[in-house]
Image: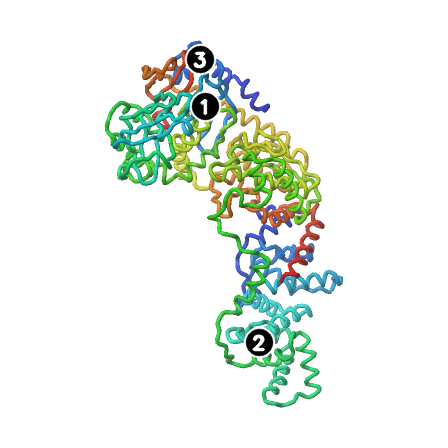
Amino acid sequence: MKLLNKLNNSSTFQRLKAQFNKPNEDKNISVENALTPFAFDLSKFRLGEPQQSGTLSIIPIFGPEAEGKFTGPLTGLKLSKVAGYGNVELSNPSAEGIAIVPLHIGYIQDGAQNHAMCRSAFLAAGQKLMFEDACCVQKSQGGYLKGQEQWFFILPLELRRKALELRGKKGYSKLWPDISTLCKKYDLPARGHLDELIVKRRTALTRYQSRLELLKGQTGALFVINNQLVGIEIAPNANYFAELWMPLVCFCYGTAAAYQEEKLAAKSGKSQAFEPFKATTLAELRAELIAERTQKHEQLLQAIANTPKEKFKVSETEKFLGLCLKTAIGKNFSGQFVEDKEQLIYASICANKVGY
Amino acid sequence: METESIHNPKTQLGQFLLHLQNETIPFQVRQKEAQPIWEDAALHEEMQEKNPILYALLAVLPSVQQEQKLRVLFQILQTSRAEMNSNQRQLLEQMTHFLLKILPTDRILTAFLALRKVRANHKHSSRAILSYLINHPFLREMLKSRRRVIQDVIEHAMGKNVARACAKYLNKIPQKLELTQAEQEYVATKLYRFAESDTRAARLFPLIYEKTVAYKKKGEYQLAHIEEWQKVNPEEKAANTLTATSKGDISATLVHLYRGGPSNDLTKALAEYVEEAAQTLPNFAGKMALLLDVSQSTRGYGEREYSHISQSVAFKLVLEKCCKDLKVYTVGSSSEAIPQPEGATDLALNLLDALAESPDLVAIVSDGYENVFAGDLQRVVATLPKIGITTPIVFCHNKFSSKDDLTQRRPATNLPELEFWHQNEWEGLLLTLFAQASEVNQEALETHLQRKLQHYLTVI
């Protein structure tokens, strides 16, 4: 706890919070300019203690429970039918509450062609919505997804920019070339078959939900791979984020982190060397460990602060009462977010790739 | 790592026990070699010299590898008992009897051959060889395939001339010739005193000098020990039918409590199950620290939800009974008696907190997912010898089944690692764990192993 207080009081964190709070105040620091150039009101958000496992680090975000009832993507959003390839109908079966479709959600079912959405959307309680711009993500699989026995994922990080660009465009096979390219990059059979990336490696990928742990009350996270910010994910409430956590950390960011880990392992050999601390007493060891962690926190926050500055093209995409869904496209980052007036409710903004 | 820690007196016995549980290299005897071949001979000798009784008793544990049990058998048979008191001699006799019951015959013959190689002909070793072979239920079958070996070891145990004389006298019986009084007395003194049945011994013993022994069945003698071994080490049930509540009564009750079941009945049952389990488990006489990982990942998900944390908490509840001076450090954000699975996994800082209280032993019970920060525990452990901390620390993997893949779940490969998934494994686990701090716990360890041996002797 002391360490966390130290982290919260660190200059970098204070600076980062200040940026979250007043995005236009310090134009030399680029975090909010890179990711939140839209005057987000983040005054009520705070960061938790970072976690790291392998090449993937996360900084938990804690925010207020958004006003109004927002249903979670697992309990409050169902795939009701597939009306031909590329046409996926989602429904919100809840009696009350709005469903915000997580950006780039996809569904997997044995024996049917898996689909992923290119965009987010609002679904009122009881509403059904046909996504005519969905992508098939299994090139050689026949059959339609049924409403039962599916599990959902978020598209791998390095496919999300392309998927976002393909929103509104019909054509079920539109993402196949990019899936194939990514498979090739990851030394997998080069075909437009997302199974290669997430289903066949599911055992290893699902470990990420244990390797990095969701904290009580957590409503979002910053994702960092190889000390480089790759994503910011914010949910309307803790329940929503809890339901989204596994698909995000395992399949969206886990796929990219696992690839980086494999690269690192190939480079450094199987057994990575570990250096003892320099301490000569138990008290010194404790102090050194804490100092090193604080330094790691600083480095992490600095890495975020060093995210290249860029301008975003922001467009209003959809409205639902006071809620507004917007799309942000920048050079290295892109995504969608939802605001209620100026209060941020949902955000999924990520890098095009690791090493931009 | 092992070489370094085996010379640390605090952990020597514990390291040796881990060696017994993990090393599977066969104990060998070769015709052209003057000595049996076992690279860990010096280690066994050293441990036997320190405490011959505890050394022998370690082989009681089912988790000790068969080839290591064989080494212990050989060692206790080849070593003189001249300096021992009658209680010690009796215990070694019991251990010999136990090991001869549960080890495969072919491997025992190797140990006997090794005794011949090293010319160990103490009374106790001769007695062990002769009683075992003369009374072996499949002696005739063994004579068909291993006659030369049996002849060699019997001649070693009895003396060549004595063995041949016995065979010569007994060969009179099939020829309907009477043995003289002197011959009868000779055979009775040299042979029958080791035999459970004089008639059977008289019939089979001369066969050790028959070049061919007829026997129709094959291989039965090789399985002679199986029935006894299974009484000591029952087979594990198939893992594919496991559920969150398949891991023993205590964790099953906790799973229901975590799921929000009716707490009064469950809480009462829980206390009873803990008490019952603790009565059969070894005790630790020293000061112990337990790092209990109750981070968010220990909640699990799907059908396995609450399985992991329930088994960890079950282990903690029992350990609190077995170790009066126990301090628990919860890794996560909950510190209740029945903690909630919450928070991140900071093993390194919790270990330093524990070490600051100077415990005799530290156990880390975890699912192995370290994230604050991954690698910290390994580095802290690597630093400890440098700053003069030699406290034994053991990483205990809590697994869903014995087949769990521990990839990405081994945060400190420089620590001794133990594993468990079922409550039934706690006895072996605790004995191995407590043996790591044998300086403070040797007596309790010896008492428990003796009790275990006595129990086994009633069932085999």
Amino acid marked by disc 3: Asp
Question: Considering only vertical position in the picture, is B149 above or below B272?
Answer: below
Q: Tag on residue B151? A: 2
- Would you say residue B76 is visible in this rendering? yes
Task: Tell me the crowding category of disc 1: few under 14, some 14 to 19, or many 20 or more residues within 10 angstroms, Cα based.
Answer: many
Q: Earlier in the sequence, mark 3 or mark 1?
A: 3
Q: Is residue B344 left or right of residue B75?
A: left
Q: Are marks 3 and 1 on the same chain?
A: yes
Residue at 70% in and 78% down = B189
> Chain ID for label 2?
B
Q: x and y percent of residue B359 in the render?
A: 67, 38
Judging from the image, what secondary structure is the residue with disc 3 in?
A: loop
A343 or A272, nearer to the observer? A343
Kindly check if marks 2 and 3 are in contact, taking CB atoms under 8 A apart as contact. Answer: no
Task: Tell me the crowding category of disc 2: few under 14, some 14 to 19, or many 20 or more residues within 10 angstroms, Cα based.
Answer: some
Disc 1: which residue: A220
Q: Quadrant of the N terminus of chain A?
A: top right
Disc 3: which residue: A41
Q: Quadrant of the C terminus of chain A?
A: top left
